[in-house]
Image: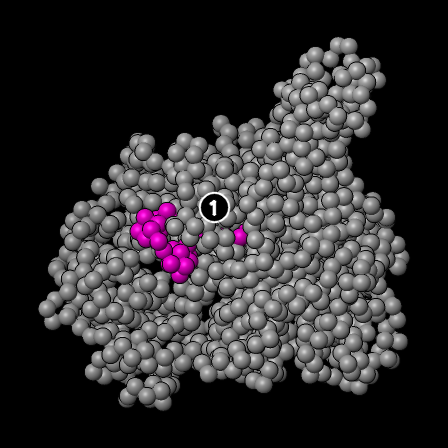
Amino acid sequence: MTSTTVAPEQVEVGKAWSGQSVPRKEDKRLVQGQGVFVDDIKRHGMGYLHFVRSPYAHAHITSIDVSKAEELPGVYGTLTGEEVAALTDPFFQISSAPGANVKDFSLAVGKVRFVGEAIVAVVAETRELARDASELVEIEYEPIDAVVDARRARDPGVPTIHEDAGGNLMWHGVYEWGDLDAAFAEADRVVKIDQLHFHRFNSTPLECDGALVEFNKGTGQWTIHTNNQFPGFAAIMMGPAMRTGLDRLRFVTQDIGGGFGNKITSHPQLVVCCLLARKLGRPIQWTEWRTDFHLSMSHGNERWFLDTEVAVKSDGTLLGFRTKALDDAGAWLRYEPLGGVIWAQVTPGMYKWRNIRVDFTQVATNKAPVSPNRGYSRMQHLWFTERVIDIVAHELDLDPVEVRKRNYIKVEDMPYETPNGCVYDSGDYAQMLDIGLELVDHANIDQRRADAQTRGKLLGVGIGSTLDSGTNNFGQSRMINPELQFSGNNEVATVKLDIFGEIVVTLGTTPQGQGHETTAAQVVADILKCSVDDVNVRAGHDSYWNSHAGFSGTYASQFAVTGLSAVKGATEMLAAEIKKLAGAVFGGVPEEALELADGTVRIKDNPEAALPFMACGAIINANNAGLPEDLGVTLNCRYVYRPPFQVPDVERKFGNLTLTYATQIHVAVIEIDPETGYYDIVDYAAVDDCGKRINPQIVEGQVMGATAQALGAAVHENFVYDEDGNLLTPNFYDYHVPHALDMPPLATGSLESPSPFTPLGTKGMGEGGGAGIHAVCAAVQDALRGHGDAIVWDSCNPYHRVWEMLNDPKGAGGTVSVTDG
Amino acid sequence: MISTEQTITVTINGTTYEREVAARKLLIHFVRDDLDLTGSHIGCDTGNCGACSMLVDGTLVKSCMMLAVQADGATVETVEGLSDGDELNRLQASFREHHALQCGYCTPGMLMSATALLREKPSPSDDEIRKALQGNICRCTGYWNIFEAVKAAAQ
Amino acid sequence: MLLREVGYARPSSLAEAIELLRADDGARALAGGQTLINVMKARAGSPDALIDLNGIDSLRGIDLAADGTLSIGAMTTYSEIVASAEARARPIIGEVCAQIADVQVRNRGTIGGNICTNDPTNHLPPLMAALGATMTIAGADGERTVTAGEFFLGVYLTAVAQGEVLTKVTVPAGRGDGFAAVTLGVDGTCIASAAASVNGSVTVALGCVDAVPVVVEPASASADDVRAAIEAAGIDPPSDVHASSAYRAHLSQVLAVRAVNQAQGAA
């Protein structure tokens, strides 16, 4: 079913752990059903919470009556927007004006702005009673017309969604680098694409959001058991809103059933749980249903690229482009408008053009709020650059492979500074493309095409190249709002020897399947020269461990850099302390004369003189009389990794925005049934380079998962709204995600181009950058060559769209014209 | 004859439980909430995801589409019954070896579906494996490693 | 995801089930539950009481008569049909049942539930219509048997009245059958479907395009005659997120021809 050039190695003892596919520590509990996911946690007397949600996309709330709900036996209480507005301050807005003026509370106040928006919370003794009681809440509405098309959101006469913002514009910025005029003057041809559309979907993690919140009245402390994947961000948003210090918010996570970015912005629901835990004096349990999730959580950025113009030489050299990006943020800015700058991490995509202008507008609409989804904002932009490449090749009758190779940034150009000052650390795109083409036997594609023809099928092959930029410099947020005081990044780890010499590691991250316990153990074991089985990594995240910092969490493709570098730093500190202690115990032996081996610290020239870790732990913790006064050894080491960043130049919108750039290049081969528009993916290759791989099997797993999600999004997954703002795909029945029988054959390949910028040579990876979407779009367009020559202008191409493209190639949008330069 | 509550007796993983339960309670909620067997999971609300899959009288079902009262007198097997104490069974060990799980949320359901398959077909073909797992959604792995793990456990 | 309060009974005989259904207008038969429980989770429909038919053995089982007629008990599951040697007398039935959703659904879902639900996207209503199946309905006054045309009345609406139970589906002997569909993912929900039978005359039944299966009888099995028959039927399919009306109409034509070709190949 899959063939791969990464042979999962047998784990070799004696060899470095890093680089080996060590079986995961997490798996033993997970395959026995012993994982602790948030809905598994129970507390005596807990109340179950159900949200009453809006049936309207846009309406004034004229009255709310919870009395009947509260009278139902077994109901503990309710919470309304009015109470929330009295008890909390609006959430901090990242945006500058006009988005800055939006007033976002954790329940709807006065108005509802999308179908599914939470209005009232009802808490009861059982899940069923909470659900029953919610039907007794009486709400009266005055409906308003809904704004559903971002392109119409600023038309005159269109309803304003946030009166405080004075209109539906949330944020606007112009990015321009190089010399556009010169580029277009030099161009032989100008390719104009009137519109491209990246569709709205997300990664639908199988576990939905949830929390169990306890309030300690005596200490004013909330304990929030949750599956929020970015507690650092949640705390920053919740603390000020709740008028409480951040230390009062203790976040505890253990196992999380997938995140993919979609579990970052649950802070409004968490605030509701906190307020109710305090109000009702009991633990509050909230589990989000699948339909709730689809209606309300973290849709990926929906983005139009309008009036794109590309300056091209006749030989296919790309000189530059300008475009108008129109981003549909949905009804609230919950992490937005950061998407308005994050794409700039990959401004030129993988290509050498230097003259670029992006006029970026973000508007509100009456749809679910947008917030990070796997590939966040870079995926949209990279899809755009890949579409441009393919459309230019199509229009100028050039080979898409040759055009890419002509324009790819070359391996000898690395590290490469992009037009806006980002530094691509390493990578060999041309070689990766060759590997991918080889894996699908591209040399013989014409024969396959002919064979498909005999069966009445149209064969198409498409390339999707993409970057996975990782480890953010949060200073880029100042390009959205110069008054923000964020910059840089950090992650924390602690490593200690316990009283009996056990090695215990805590992380600041919130893994959702990325195997952090395992890869952290590999790094520790390499430095302490022990077995991975001797390294105990605590599962999950807990604010009480003091093992986190402002940016702690698991998001944005960074653990292999931030988390593991923190682990490396802490372990090296510990190793040095162990040697220092041993040196003192041995009577003044210098560190250079000592080594770690087999769970001991020993003198290199006299290995018999060895102190086991157990002795070290015991001495420091329980038997420390007589040690030198200035020894400075605790064997409990906390390290904060801080990537090397500067605050970007906000004026020029210039500077390094991410530390590492993993790459993926995919090749898709499809066959279309022209009678129906149905198509199969008949062959597929994914080539990945994320620098040094600590655990190749885990890395490959991420590549596979990202591929599957991208294929689902390319063919089926779409949050589609009707003109009244009703979501037509609110559950897994209509929102089809890939199942076992949908999976194509998969071949994988890899390169390792270490990053020169990271302590371990690793690059963050995992998001993947949506290469599957880019590849399938390209394959569909290729298959339609000579059969109408339709341009693929939308990122989602279900069967009906393919049929429409066959039957009406010029219809419905995505028109292209080519003029002389 | 018609009642909104009923006392039911269910044997799960060898232990017999007698509980009073509302007729409206889904089997998955009974197992998770009333019996604290939280290994089986809930991932959707339309019967599509399979995270709740378990064996009822030897038959693989999605327990979110059965009422607890329908399991009265039945013998149920969930993920908690697969391993012998702390010793992983062949299928579980194969999942671990082949990295057939990432977040682990779909895994209990996957294991039960694979268990049902291997009981019926000890040496399934690749197509039979896919068909058997069609009712279990995974968002993390893309399924390819899961197919490998089941195949390897079969040999 | 959480049902409203509901009563429950599990009768052990058909007579008991009929009595319980007659006694309460809000009582509803529970077959496989693979649709009804989801409807109740969404609170789109909340019967007062569920009369569980799973304990009534007389509603299960497949009987193959000497003349090739198949009698399929209404509570026979899709899995049981797929595994049944008797059902192989009319192979298309098992082939289509094997495409429904997944193993878990097939282990509980029943032929009776599928046709009594009569969701336009269900596989079995058009198939039964094309095969010329008849449905036997039992009530307090006894049994009656109706044709598919008399059985399927509207969306979620069949000839089974309150207080009645579908007991079996009877399929005449034959082999020349076909079924073609475009689905939302492999083995997914049907976007368009066509069932065909060429035993004697040609019959095509379309799913997904109307409240009930649309049955046409082309002059011959030729593609032109099949398409002409669909055209003449004047279908006006619904539009939804998966297909426009025009696309569904087009697919119906294509799938009808494919189903007929498959039927000819199997004859």
Who is closer to the viewer here, A296 or A459?
A459
Q: Which residue is mark 1?
A: B95
Kind of element beneath mark 1: helix
Measured along the vertical axis of the image, is residue C69 above or below residue A11?
A: below
Percent x, y for residue A535?
62, 32
Chain part drawn in magenta = B114-141
| Image quarter hosting the C terminus of chain C | bottom left
* Amino acid type, mark 1: Phe
Above or below, A86 against A633 in this view is below
Q: Chain of mark 1?
A: B
Tally of numbered discs: 1
Q: Say which quarter of the image contains residue A229.
A: top right
Queried whether the magenta region covers residue B131, the answer comes back as yes
Residue name at image x 78 percent, y 76 percent: A317
* Residue C102 placement (x, y as % from top left): 38, 57
Q: Position of residue A452 (x, y in %)?
A: 49, 79
The residue furthest left is: C66
Query: For residue A499: magenta?
Result: no
Across and down, in percent, residue A339 comes to 72, 56
Residue A330 is drawn in which quadrant?
A: bottom right
Task: Locate residue B32 relative to residue A193 in the image: left or right.
Answer: left
